[in-house]
Image (tube, rainbow, N blue to C red):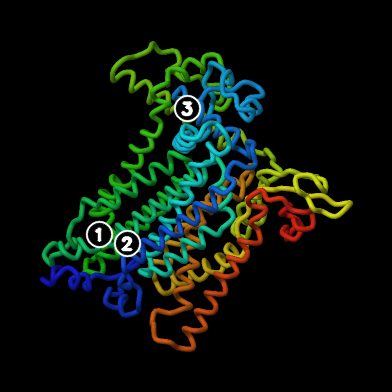
Amino acid sequence: MSTGAPPEQETVALSRTVSGDEVPLATERARGWRFAEDPIVGWTGAIAITVLALFLRVWRLGTPHQFSFDETYYAKDAWSMLHFGYVRTYVDEADRTILNGQTTGIWKDEPSMIVHPELGKWLIGLGEKAFGMDPFGWRIAAAVVGSLMVLVMCRFIRRVTGSTSLGLVGGLLLSFDGLHLVLSRLGLLDIFLAFFLLCGAHCLVADRAWFRQRLARRTTSASGWGGRVLWRPWLVGAGVCFGLAIGTKWTALYPMAAFGVLVWLWSAGARRSHGVRWATARSALVDGVPAFFSLVMVALVVYVATWGGWLAHAGEYERSTLSDSQYTQYGGGKQWPTATEPDASGLGEVSQSLRSLAHYHRDVYMFHAHFLNDSTHVYASKPSGWLLMNRPVGVDAQLDIKPGSQGCEAPPGSDCLRQVLLLGNPVLWWGGCLALLLAVVMWAGARDWRFGVAVVGVASTWLPWLMYDDRPIFIFYAICCLPFVVLAITLAMGKLIGASRTPSPRRTAGVIVAGSFFVLVLANFAWFWPIWTDVLLTHDEWMDRVWFKRWI
């Protein structure tokens, strides 16, 4: 329904809805949901926080000078992909050889079975290409992407809340989390996964506003459908981001599916606000089908494209399945049919390579679903306790450093140590659990869509892991929950402070509570900094930071 008014006035006709709840944007503005933003202030603040985050993440990035945790897989896989286009197996003692500065004579002439998609390793490889095959080289990509994630976080919260201040606070909270800090300083895949998921969620929130504006302009009372909006560029952008996320780790499938349902409900709510009857059912056809192609099919195309290196060398893998048991053991002893087929050419070769990739996916799925069952790991943890930081992961530790060695100033009879511990900022995560409870209440009770983004984001990146708690899984997988935990916290802060800018005792109390929480997060960050960054500590100083036995 067009009012004939200028666009800035016409948008007042739009509503904020979740499954039928209607709150006009005029009311949102009156409540303070959207504030006029000085783009210079907003972007300058976000970039400044990003630069701070980058400094914290590149400081002494090359230490410890060794392969930490699963870096031994991803760093070498990335180096192999740079040189051959696919992953080769390595000779024994390859780690030691690389750390001594030698990168020749470390490969075998056969492809290696990798159990995660390739994109994250290509990104790690970019850092190795630029800075060499050393710890700094295989970690710098994670540091850059982790810092960019802080920038996206600032803008994401700004878009959800309409508040530049809350956006900047959210970026700082993300920057001051230990889980995010350490993963931004390691050559692992999870920081890339979390970054692409956040970008995808950001695009979907942008699509919500874009869709509602276009719907308001195209709606006619005679249509009965509330207008049709087939081309949704932000939704296509989300499809690209989710495709990149799945191309890093398959676990991105769960949030893509969950947010896809949420997009449908948002679309149905927007149509209901225009008086469309049976809006949910009608939206499933009018909006759901085009949205499926924009989101899911685009993600599929992008995902397959991330396997470009593998597809170009599919023949190497096909030949290996004839002799190498590492491929057939995960697939139940089944060789790929393509392994015995004559090499094709042209479109036939493309088809053959894609079928080989499908068989490869079967083997990888069998590995993840069954091969690790009943395995154990000293740092494995139950996902039910991840949000409470129940069991961190010791990435690296140098123990028994004697007094006088490496600058150790421990008293006689004691010693020093260095440690890198994958542990989130406890104050942030524990406060985030309370904020998530509030988010559930506000989404279900007050029907506030903004809290729904936080709830769906955490639920879709955390709850699926409960199905796999019979195999070794680790707390740092919760990094994908973190942006939505931070969103819940900043929304709670906004509720505490209130929308009105008029001074009042309630607003003053809210500012004090929210400000005190932020200061505690910052103090916690400073306190745990040494065990996140391999700083030398005496044994007593280390024990002061290990608050629970499960953290050892």
Amino acid under label 2? Trp
Residue 462 lies left or right of residue 36; in this view the side is right
Inspect the image, locate mark 1, and give the three-letter code of the amino acid beneath it.
Phe
Classify 462 as above or below 9: above
- How far across and down, in percent of the image, does residue 488 sit? 48, 66
Q: Report the disc number at residue 266.
A: 2
Please report whichever mark, 1 or 2, sits nearer to the chain's N-terminal start.
1
Seen in the image, is 17 located left or right of residue 397?
Answer: left
Dot 3 amino acid type: Met
Query: Residue at horizontal 43%, vertical 44%?
Result: 245
Q: Quadrant of residue 263?
A: bottom left
Q: Which residue was labeled with disc 3?
A: 81
Q: Secondary structure at mark 3?
A: helix
Marks 3 and 1: which is nearer the front? 3
Residue for point 31% across, 74% down:
23
Q: Indicate which disc residue 549 carries.
A: none
Residue under label 1: 211
